[in-house]
Amino acid sequence: MPKKRSELKAEAFTIKATMKVAAVVGPPSAGAFKERPAKPTMLRKYYHRGDLPVVVNHIGNGGRAIKWKVDIYSLDYHHYLPLFFDGLCETTFPCELFARQGIYELLKIGGPKILPVIPQLIIPIRNAMNTRNHQVMCTTLRAIQQLLQSADGVGEAMVPYLGRILTVFNIFKNKNENCGDEVG
Protein backbone atom coordinates (compact mmCIF):
# COMPACT_ATOMS: atom_id res chain seq x y z
CA MET A 1 0.00 0.00 0.00
CA PRO A 2 1.61 3.29 -1.11
CA LYS A 3 1.99 6.11 1.36
CA LYS A 4 -0.11 9.21 0.81
CA ARG A 5 1.77 12.43 0.73
CA SER A 6 0.21 15.01 2.93
CA GLU A 7 0.25 18.50 1.59
CA LEU A 8 1.87 21.08 3.78
CA LYS A 9 0.27 24.50 3.74
CA ALA A 10 2.79 27.30 3.86
CA GLU A 11 2.82 31.06 3.61
CA ALA A 12 4.37 32.59 0.52
CA PHE A 13 8.04 33.58 0.57
CA THR A 14 9.01 31.24 3.41
CA ILE A 15 11.40 28.31 3.45
CA LYS A 16 8.48 25.89 3.83
CA ALA A 17 7.07 27.20 0.54
CA THR A 18 10.11 25.87 -1.35
CA MET A 19 9.44 22.27 -0.31
CA LYS A 20 7.96 19.92 -2.92
CA VAL A 21 5.03 18.88 -0.73
CA ALA A 22 4.13 22.45 0.19
CA ALA A 23 1.09 24.25 -1.13
CA VAL A 24 1.28 28.01 -0.90
CA VAL A 25 -1.76 29.58 0.67
CA GLY A 26 -2.97 32.83 -0.83
CA PRO A 27 -3.38 36.03 1.13
CA PRO A 28 -6.52 36.59 3.18
CA SER A 29 -9.34 38.68 1.79
CA ALA A 30 -8.88 42.39 2.46
CA GLY A 31 -12.61 42.88 2.96
CA ALA A 32 -12.93 46.04 0.86
CA PHE A 33 -16.55 45.25 -0.04
CA LYS A 34 -17.47 43.75 3.34
CA GLU A 35 -20.38 45.42 5.07
CA ARG A 36 -19.48 47.33 8.18
CA PRO A 37 -21.85 47.70 11.08
CA ALA A 38 -23.32 51.14 11.56
CA LYS A 39 -23.12 52.81 14.93
CA PRO A 40 -26.39 53.84 16.57
CA THR A 41 -27.52 57.03 14.88
CA MET A 42 -28.74 60.23 16.48
CA LEU A 43 -32.02 59.77 14.59
CA ARG A 44 -32.63 56.50 16.44
CA LYS A 45 -31.75 58.11 19.78
CA TYR A 46 -34.14 61.00 19.12
CA TYR A 47 -36.85 58.53 18.08
CA HIS A 48 -36.53 56.48 21.26
CA ARG A 49 -36.60 59.65 23.37
CA GLY A 50 -39.69 60.88 21.50
CA ASP A 51 -37.96 64.06 20.29
CA LEU A 52 -38.57 63.62 16.55
CA PRO A 53 -41.20 65.95 15.06
CA VAL A 54 -42.58 63.11 12.90
CA VAL A 55 -44.81 60.06 13.32
CA VAL A 56 -45.69 57.18 11.02
CA ASN A 57 -48.88 57.77 9.04
CA HIS A 58 -50.40 54.48 7.91
CA ILE A 59 -52.08 54.88 4.53
CA GLY A 60 -54.60 52.46 3.06
CA ASN A 61 -53.32 49.36 1.24
CA GLY A 62 -50.43 48.97 3.69
CA GLY A 63 -48.59 52.12 2.64
CA ARG A 64 -46.66 54.24 5.07
CA ALA A 65 -45.63 57.87 5.11
CA ILE A 66 -44.56 60.35 7.74
CA LYS A 67 -46.70 62.99 9.34
CA TRP A 68 -45.13 66.10 10.83
CA LYS A 69 -46.11 67.01 14.39
CA VAL A 70 -45.01 70.62 13.81
CA ASP A 71 -45.13 73.02 10.91
CA ILE A 72 -42.40 71.85 8.53
CA TYR A 73 -41.74 75.41 7.37
CA SER A 74 -40.70 76.46 10.88
CA LEU A 75 -38.11 73.69 11.42
CA ASP A 76 -34.50 74.55 12.17
CA TYR A 77 -32.61 73.11 9.19
CA HIS A 78 -29.26 73.37 10.98
CA HIS A 79 -30.56 70.87 13.51
CA TYR A 80 -32.99 68.59 11.69
CA LEU A 81 -31.50 68.16 8.20
CA PRO A 82 -28.19 66.72 9.53
CA LEU A 83 -30.22 64.58 11.94
CA PHE A 84 -32.22 63.03 9.11
CA PHE A 85 -29.08 62.57 6.98
CA ASP A 86 -27.50 60.77 9.94
CA GLY A 87 -30.43 58.36 9.77
CA LEU A 88 -29.40 57.20 6.28
CA CYS A 89 -27.44 54.39 7.98
CA GLU A 90 -30.67 52.94 9.35
CA THR A 91 -32.11 49.80 7.77
CA THR A 92 -34.96 49.05 10.17
CA PHE A 93 -38.48 50.39 10.38
CA PRO A 94 -39.44 53.13 11.36
CA CYS A 95 -36.08 54.94 11.44
CA GLU A 96 -35.34 54.14 7.79
CA LEU A 97 -38.72 55.58 6.79
CA PHE A 98 -38.16 58.71 8.89
CA ALA A 99 -34.74 59.29 7.33
CA ARG A 100 -35.79 58.78 3.70
CA GLN A 101 -39.08 60.65 3.85
CA GLY A 102 -37.76 63.35 6.18
CA ILE A 103 -34.88 64.15 3.83
CA TYR A 104 -37.17 64.13 0.81
CA GLU A 105 -39.72 66.49 2.34
CA LEU A 106 -37.18 68.85 3.91
CA LEU A 107 -35.26 69.14 0.64
CA LYS A 108 -38.46 69.62 -1.35
CA ILE A 109 -39.44 72.78 0.52
CA GLY A 110 -36.08 73.90 1.93
CA GLY A 111 -34.92 76.28 -0.77
CA PRO A 112 -32.37 78.77 0.58
CA LYS A 113 -32.29 77.11 4.03
CA ILE A 114 -30.36 74.14 2.60
CA LEU A 115 -27.18 75.82 1.36
CA PRO A 116 -25.78 76.88 4.78
CA VAL A 117 -26.25 73.35 6.13
CA ILE A 118 -24.14 71.56 3.47
CA PRO A 119 -20.95 71.30 5.60
CA GLN A 120 -22.92 69.54 8.34
CA LEU A 121 -24.23 66.92 5.89
CA ILE A 122 -20.85 65.62 4.73
CA ILE A 123 -20.02 63.49 7.79
CA PRO A 124 -23.43 61.73 7.86
CA ILE A 125 -23.17 61.06 4.11
CA ARG A 126 -19.68 59.64 4.52
CA ASN A 127 -20.74 57.49 7.49
CA ALA A 128 -23.62 56.06 5.46
CA MET A 129 -21.34 55.26 2.52
CA ASN A 130 -18.76 53.65 4.82
CA THR A 131 -21.28 51.03 5.96
CA ARG A 132 -20.87 49.52 2.47
CA ASN A 133 -24.37 48.14 2.80
CA HIS A 134 -25.96 48.00 -0.67
CA GLN A 135 -29.35 49.28 0.53
CA VAL A 136 -27.82 52.12 2.56
CA MET A 137 -25.53 53.15 -0.29
CA CYS A 138 -28.41 53.28 -2.79
CA THR A 139 -30.54 55.32 -0.39
CA THR A 140 -27.62 57.68 0.21
CA LEU A 141 -27.05 58.16 -3.51
CA ARG A 142 -30.72 59.05 -3.98
CA ALA A 143 -30.47 61.52 -1.10
CA ILE A 144 -27.39 63.11 -2.69
CA GLN A 145 -29.25 63.43 -5.99
CA GLN A 146 -32.18 65.10 -4.26
CA LEU A 147 -29.80 67.37 -2.36
CA LEU A 148 -28.08 68.51 -5.56
CA GLN A 149 -31.41 69.29 -7.23
CA SER A 150 -32.97 70.97 -4.19
CA ALA A 151 -31.48 74.46 -4.39
CA ASP A 152 -29.22 76.61 -6.50
CA GLY A 153 -25.56 76.53 -5.54
CA VAL A 154 -25.63 73.21 -3.69
CA GLY A 155 -23.35 71.52 -6.23
CA GLU A 156 -20.77 74.28 -5.97
CA ALA A 157 -20.99 74.19 -2.18
CA MET A 158 -20.25 70.45 -2.17
CA VAL A 159 -17.12 70.67 -4.33
CA PRO A 160 -14.68 71.19 -1.40
CA TYR A 161 -16.05 68.07 0.29
CA LEU A 162 -16.07 65.69 -2.68
CA GLY A 163 -12.73 64.14 -1.74
CA ARG A 164 -14.24 62.85 1.50
CA ILE A 165 -17.27 61.33 -0.21
CA LEU A 166 -15.72 59.98 -3.41
CA THR A 167 -13.24 57.66 -1.65
CA VAL A 168 -15.94 55.04 -1.06
CA PHE A 169 -17.33 55.52 -4.57
CA ASN A 170 -13.86 54.78 -5.92
CA ILE A 171 -13.87 51.38 -4.21
CA PHE A 172 -17.21 50.42 -5.75
CA LYS A 173 -16.82 51.97 -9.21
CA ASN A 174 -15.91 48.65 -10.87
CA LYS A 175 -18.26 46.46 -8.84
CA ASN A 176 -21.02 45.45 -11.19
CA GLU A 177 -23.83 43.18 -10.13
CA ASN A 178 -25.42 41.71 -13.21
CA CYS A 179 -29.17 41.81 -12.72
CA GLY A 180 -30.02 40.21 -16.03
CA ASP A 181 -33.18 41.74 -17.44
CA GLU A 182 -33.94 43.63 -14.23
CA VAL A 183 -33.15 47.26 -14.62
CA GLY A 184 -33.55 49.09 -11.40
Image (cartoon, rainbow, N blue to C red):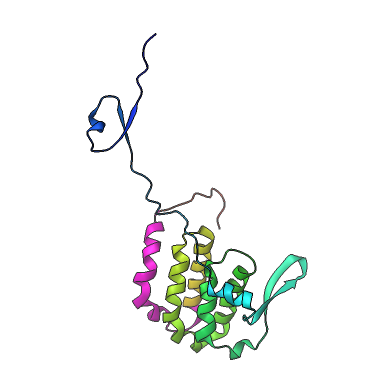
Q: Is residue 119 above or below residue 112?
A: above
Determine which quarter of the picture holds residue 46: bottom right
Task: Judge by depth and name the residue closer to the eye, 93 or 42.
Answer: 42
Q: Is residue 49 above or below residue 90?
A: below
153 falls in the magenta region = yes
Magenta extent: 149-174
Q: Residue at x 62, y 86 (%)?
A: 72
30 falls in the magenta region = no
Task: Judge by depth and name the residue closer to the eye, 107 or 90.
Answer: 90
Q: Quadrant of the N terminus?
A: top left
Q: Quadrant of the C terminus?
A: bottom right
| Residue 125 horizontal side relative to residue 23, left or right | right
Q: Can residue 95 be seen here? A: yes
| Residue 158 horizontal side relative to residue 145, left or right | left
Determine which quarter of the picture holds residue 166: bottom left
| Residue 72 horizontal side relative to residue 41, left or right | right
Image coords of residue 178 (percent x, y): 50, 49
Point out the residue furthest to the bottom here. 74
Q: Can residue 104 be seen here? A: no
Q: Residue at x 74, y 65 (%)?
A: 62
Image coords of residue 71 (percent x, y): 64, 89
Image coords of residue 177 (percent x, y): 48, 51
Task: Judge by depth and name the residue closer to the eye, 162 or 80.
Answer: 80
Image coords of residue 125 (percent x, y): 46, 71
Q: Residue at x 46, y 73 (%)?
A: 124
Q: Residue at x 33, y 43 (%)?
A: 27
Point out the residue furthest to the right here. 60
Q: Is residue 160 above or below residue 16?
A: below
Instruction: Label the magenta part by its dominant secondary structure.
Output: helix
